[in-house]
Amino acid sequence: MFSILRSLWLTFLHTFHKRFTIQYPEEKAKLPARWRGRIVLTRDPDGAERCVACYLCAAACPVDCISLQAAEDETGRRYPEFFRINFSRCIFCGFCEDACPTYAIQLTPDFELVEYDRQNLVYEKENLLISGPGKYHDYNFYRVAGYAVGGKGKGEAEREDPPIDIHDLKP
Amino acid sequence: MVKITIDGNVYEVDPKDNLLQTILSLGLDLPYFCWHPALGSVGSCRQCAVKKYSGEDDQKGRIVMACMEPVVDGMRISVNDPEVKDFRANIIELLMTNHPHDCPVCDEGGECHLQDVTLMSGHNYRQFDFNKRTHNNQYLGPFINHEMNRCIQCYRCVRFYREYAGGRDFNVFSSRNRVFFGRYEDGVLENEFSGNLAEVCPTGVFTDKTYKQHFTRKWDLTTAPSICHNCSLGCNIIAGERYGTIRRIASRYNGKVNGYFICDRGRFGYEYVNSDQRIREPLRRGQASGRLEPVDRETVFNYFKKIFDKKPRLLGIGSPKASLESNHALQMLVGKENFFAGVSAVEHQLTLKAIQILKEGPAEVPSLRETEKADTVLILGEDVTNTAPMLALSLRQASRQKPMELPIKMNVPTWHEMAVLELMQDERSPFFVLTPTETKLDDIATAVYRNAPDNIARLAHAVAHYIDSAAPEVENLSEEETELVKQIAENLLSSKQPLIVSGTSCLNESLLEAAANITRALKKRQKSPWIFLTVPEANSVGLALLDEKDLNQAIEKALSDSYDALIILENDLYRRIEEDKANKLFDAFEHVIVLHYLHNSTTDKANLVVPVGPFSESDGTLVNNEGRAQRFYQVFYPGDSVKESWRWLGQIITGHGLNGRSELSKLDDFIEALVRDFPELKAVKDLAPNADFRIAGQKIPRQSHRYSGRTSMNANVNVSEPKPPEDEDSPMSFTMEGYQGMPPSPFISRFWYPGWNSVQAVNKFQIEVGGALRGGDPGLRVFEPQTDSDAPYYTRIPEAFKPQKDQWFAIPVFHIFGSDELSIYTPGVAELAPKPYLLLNQKDAESFSGEKVNVLLDGKQIELTVKTSSSFPSGMVGIPFGLPEMKIFKFPNWVKISG
């Protein structure tokens, strides 16, 4: 008898508690920054495309929903000629983000991917590429890689000595 | 056989190899860099450390490099001792201090031996916080990309390029951790085997530049075992596809044919497959427009139906670049008497002669790889570097065979590369190069002889006569020639394994006969000589086995008999015969039907063009120059319009109920029909298991288990994935589903093994490292030489060549890049191909004033730039063969020059 009354009382008290249910879609949920939602391609701090088309995201993807083709500009910088994600297959596991060596591919807290037509869930590079660096503000792959690209020659990356003179035989 | 103990387990092994090779042959994993089965041991990378104990009581042991250690009876070693594992991890850590952080943009990533070994050694995290040394890169030509920062100083590249392949324009520079591998200055790598640097280099210093232009990771390639179509040797290759285009060609190890390597024409000459000149749908000449217009498949069959309504007579022309199955399918369609080999009379005659010589014996015919073991080489007329490049690489190894006796005598193991080289110094096997033009093998030759093909044949006949006086005698040789004859003959007689090399490129039958005579004379003197003859094209021998009639006979027959239609299989007749002859043939027909994959002058004449698959989109069998039949498999499914030639022809044959044939739809049906019509080709049936073969009920996948993008690559067209294509012709599937273990050797489409992502995984596919593939190397001879035959000598000795006053004797000059019809579609190959020229002896050239001369050839005048050579025989001219800018002329021929 006491326990029934107690339960009724506790239930009554909830009337004055803060509400957890939100009125979606009028009201949006507050999601943590590392929520795994819609995938984007980011740019480095200099504003250039971060993706170097290494194919690791595609290899890591358990549902094989990422495809791309590597290309190289005239300065030797690699970029994806096309980059396609089929979101109708994506399971938002985040493996691609884990695999990415350049922080280019990132998952965002946007989960509202709904379409009447499944074909519209196929995102190309122009749909994926954003104009900022995403979650990682400072990283620039080409600043640490020994690969020469436009604006950065051999020996100009971080922790690199200038190129050696091959005619030098000094010990 | 000796017994050795590795980590407590006793193994019985053959002591012929070094310890590292033995450990790998036993299937154990041991990291290494500088050792390569073809290049031997130098002990420079210190990666293959193992612990060696001096006896049963030795608990401490000492660390030794496995690649420098001979295998002795009772030896006790440890591969997994903690101290030695630590040692290996430290070595890799040191090597990695200067290795840049650029795997994501490195083409080697994912198939990198350095990545594999780093993981194998357990060096997972970097601790080096200091500056890395850097290098400037060089431009090395259109084929090889240079990224010197990645170098780990294993010296494999320079050992391959200089010692194995004989290149001179590549070396190692500077000192200590700054050593640099490259050329003296920027420029195109001169060696014809430079592409192998990409496979020899354990990391990404040298990579395939054509691959870089459409780069795909190894795991994303759809790959199939294939055979190179660019010369007659039939090197085994792996062709890889992604998104409908061929991305790269890699060598496929075959212990009997090409071993570990392929030439640059084979590796890079694939881009015609992706060319915009490809024919991808059926084309019919519009009645109004007169141009070829796309039509559907039904129109092709209706076109044939209309022809067949009249009980037609068809004339079929085959191709030495097309498979046995395709040629035979055309033969079935038109009937044997109406089928002609699509090659010029002289070429076909010589190929038939070569086959006759090979079959008759008594010389044995070595495989391409076996020629490395010859210890005396005589080359008659053939510039092998340009006509059969991989043979040049093998012969270069043969030139080390005789001096190898010294290290063997002194008990120095043959795998001990540096010691062997020190002992040999500049010593070479007796090596004679008798050719009209300079060759790239002259540098290793004991003696060279530059003369007209007839004179070379005379000299060779004299060699035969010197060896056995029953062979026909040659008169009027000069004193020097007699001396050379003596030198060659004595060397052949004193050698253990003499090899006579000749071929068809001089277009001289006497040369082949002389080569045969020498082997017959040697046989009479109780020698067991080898003979190796090259032929013009990938399936020249196969085509000659199917039919003995050539193009000239086809033209005669077409003009004398009444035919309704001409069907040409994968052949550009304007590259086979002179223009006016070809025109005459085409003019005789109302219907010209061409099955081809590229637009060319022949398809321009066609009324109907049927799109067929090149090597990447067809299955088939080729017979190489030694009579070895080898199967190549379709790499990818090109869509519904492009089909194999044999499939199109088979559908037409069955569609019209011709010849009362049984069903012809799958590859196996065509092989069955081929073997029924040509019982001597029965080996073709046993080349590989047929299409019903399964392992554990599964097909063998063409894609790796890591293949990516399957639900996305076609999503831009349709988000619903299509059903994958099925392969009814082979036991392989076009997808990643199936048995991912080790397939039977004819179906190896990639070398991969857990922990071994790089091409070094090939070790796991061999019975013992450097030997045959598990289950035997694929490929079977369709004919074997009759070694006990008593074939008579050829008695026709040609007249000595006499220069004439106002006429010049023209011979074709072949170029590895430029003389081949298809590889020239690769931009890099076109870049390296020579511009049209006229080769003249220096003295002869003095009689012409200008740089250019007018040459009157077959009644046509052309202007050519003069190139001179001091050794080119006087009274002759050399004309580059098959350059795209030049028409085909009748060779050999007399021409007039003015200017």
Image (cartoon, grey):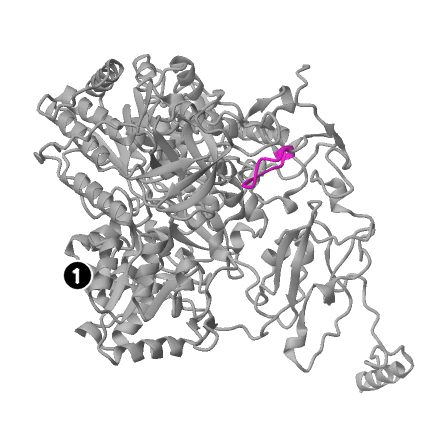
Farthest right residue in view: A16
Question: Above or below — where is B691 with respect to B500?
Answer: below
**Rendered residue at 32%/71% (across/down):** B590
Chain of the residue under label 1: B
Relative placement, left or right, of B405 versus B101 is left
Relative placement, left or right, of B885 versus B89 is left
Instruction: Count the marks.
Output: 1
- Which residue in the structure is indicated by mark 1? B677
Q: Which of B818 and B660 is in front in this view?
A: B818
Location of residue B781 in the rendering, given as x and y in whole percent from the top left corner: 22, 46
Question: Above or below — where is B336 with respect to B81?
Answer: below
Task: Please give the range of residues in magenta.
Answer: B138-150
Kind of residue at badge 1: Asp
**Rendered residue at 70%/34% (across/down):** B127
Location of residue B102 in the rendering, given as x and y in whole percent from the top left corner: 66, 42
Relative placement, left or right, of B51 versus A31 is left
Determine the image quadrant of residue B674: bottom left
The N terminus of chain B - image quarter: top left
Q: Which of A146 and B313 is in front in this view?
A: B313
